[in-house]
Image (cartoon, rainbow, N blue to C red):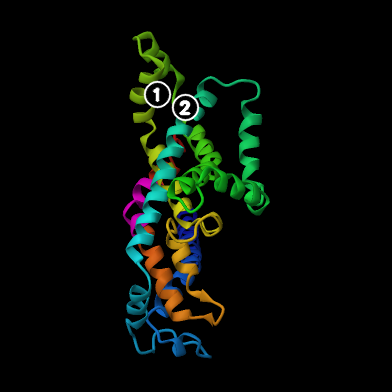
Amino acid sequence: MARAVTTQRKVINTTAAWAVGLLIFFPILWTILTSFKTEAQAISDPPVFLAFDWTLENYEAVLERSNYARFLWNSIIIAGGSTILGIIVAVPAAWSMAFVPSRKTKDILLWMLSTKMLPAVGVLYPIYLIFIQMGLLDSRAGLVIVLMLINLPIIVWMLYTYFKEIPVDILEAGRMDGASLKDEILYILTPMAIPGIASTLLLNFILAWNEAFWTLNLTAAKAAPLTAFIASYSSPEGLFYAKLSAASTMAIAPILILGWFSQKQLVSGLTFGAVK
């Protein structure tokens, strides 16, 4: 009887997980399908799912109109740069909070997390003026700094959680063997926390890749990433849904492929320390 209940529960949980997964994935699937339709089919009522004339004309139009490679390269530089810079800053910060905590450590962590609740538009104007004065407007360096700072609380929180799972005795043994602070972080702590660091890298890269508010407001043409590439297909004349879907598919394809091939590392890192 107990075995039958357990089996039934597993079936229900699996079915629910598939249902939620398909519900989340459906907008992406619909975007991909729409990218292969004509503009007339894209706005047809009722909408057509698979029974339409498949075409590549939207992709051809997008590639002819825009320099996709330049937008893609900007996204890689901005997302990759902000991720690497964020890890460099966050590892020492998370180490100090995890292994040398003070009475205010939890307050600092909560304060850092509370900054994510601040509406971005509330600080857009001062940052915009600072960027103008420093010559960082429409530059990849400026976006790297901004995206690193807005994602830094999440990076520090994740690394702090992973580091707390590492026994302090191992670090103390390293100190007794003569390890310096740099050696402790680079050669003892970092290798042990590789799954957590890897998942943090991937998550931050995805967040930076998908960021639209800052990239649209702090760039014009020179440093515009793929989010600006998508936005360029919204015009005063209206939305060209098929071409917009093609541009969106080309923008999300690299990150979908990356997520697919790195899902094992991502899951491993997110469950790091969950089971002792």
Q: Residue at left 40%, top 40%?
A: 84
Span of residues in magenta: 256-266
Image coordinates of residue 272 in percent, x first then y, are 43, 38
> Is 123 displayed left or right of 267 in the figure?
right
Q: Amino acid at mark 2?
A: Pro
Q: Secondary structure at mark 2?
A: helix
Q: Are marks 2 and 1 in contact (CB under 8 Å)?
A: yes
Residue that carries the numbered disc 2 in the rendered image? 92
When asked about the image quadrant of residue 105, the answer is: top right
Label 2 vs 1, first from the N-terminus: 2
Residue 45 marker: none
Marks 2 and 1, how far apart in space? 8 Å
Residue 99 against residue 274 in the figure, above or below: above
Q: Is 257 in the magenta?
A: yes
Q: Is 25 in the magenta?
A: no
Image coordinates of residue 273 in percent, x first then y, are 45, 35
Image coordinates of residue 91 in percent, x first then y, are 45, 31
Q: Nearer the viewer, residue 90 or 5?
A: 90
Q: Residue at left 56%, top 48%?
A: 132
> Is 184 displayed left or right of 142 in the figure?
left
Instruction: Say few, some or many: other residues with alpha carbon within 10 Å of mark 1 (under 14 / 14 to 19 / 20 or more).
Output: some
Residue that carries the numbered disc 1 in the rendered image? 185
